[in-house]
Image (cartoon, rainbow, N blue to C red):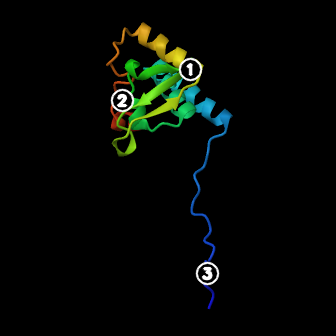
Amino acid sequence: MSRFPLVRYQAEKDLPEYLQPGEARQIINAAAGSRQGARDQLFLDLLLQTGIRISEALRTTPGDLTWLNRQPVLWIRKGKGGKTRQVSLPARIAAELLEYQRQHQLRPGDRFFPITRQRFKGC
């Protein structure tokens, strides 16, 4: 008998499907028709560009936006497992978040997206 038993190959279980860039753009553009179109477009763009979870994005505040080596970074506080991590942020998204903060006069602790996860699912 071999010291290394044979292991049967198991086919990959359902792999996630990814959006093509054009499909992602269609979703973001469709949000423009909502009552809070600018907010919703920014929210969806943030999700798609960073890969953060919905609940993490909903907790994002202007105080979570910072720079590291002149690159925008978003602090994710109390993410999955209650851990804190940094996520690289495209410069365009960082600029849009800062402009949104300015337009809505958000303080560092105010949430960018003051809606609940359940409310977002209903949009």
Q: Residue at x 45, y 13 (%)?
A: 100
Q: Is residue 78 left or right of residue 85?
A: left
Q: Quadrant of residue 12?
A: bottom right
Density class for disc 2 (Cα within 10 Å; few <14, some 14-19, many ≥20) is many
Give the residue pinned by disc 1. 69
Q: Is residue 71 above or below residue 6?
A: above
Q: Residue at x 40, y 34 (%)?
A: 56
Q: Is residue 68 left or right of residue 105?
A: right
How many numbered marks, from 0 up? 3
Q: Residue at x 40, y 23 (%)?
A: 64
Distance from disc 1 to disc 3, alpha carbons, whole Å, reads 48 Å
Judge by depth and name the residue closer to the eye, 95 or 32.
95
Amino acid type, residue under disc 2 in the picture: Arg
Q: Where is residue 76 drawn, in percent x and y?
A: 41, 32
Distance from disc 1 to disc 2, alpha carbons, whole Å, reads 24 Å
Judge by depth and name the residue closer to the eye, 38 or 96.
96
Question: What label does residue 4 carry, if any?
Answer: 3
Amino acid type, residue under disc 3 in the picture: Phe
- Please tell me whether mark 2 or mark 3 is closer to you in this view: 3
Q: Quadrant of residue 104?
A: top left
Give the residue pinned by disc 2. 59
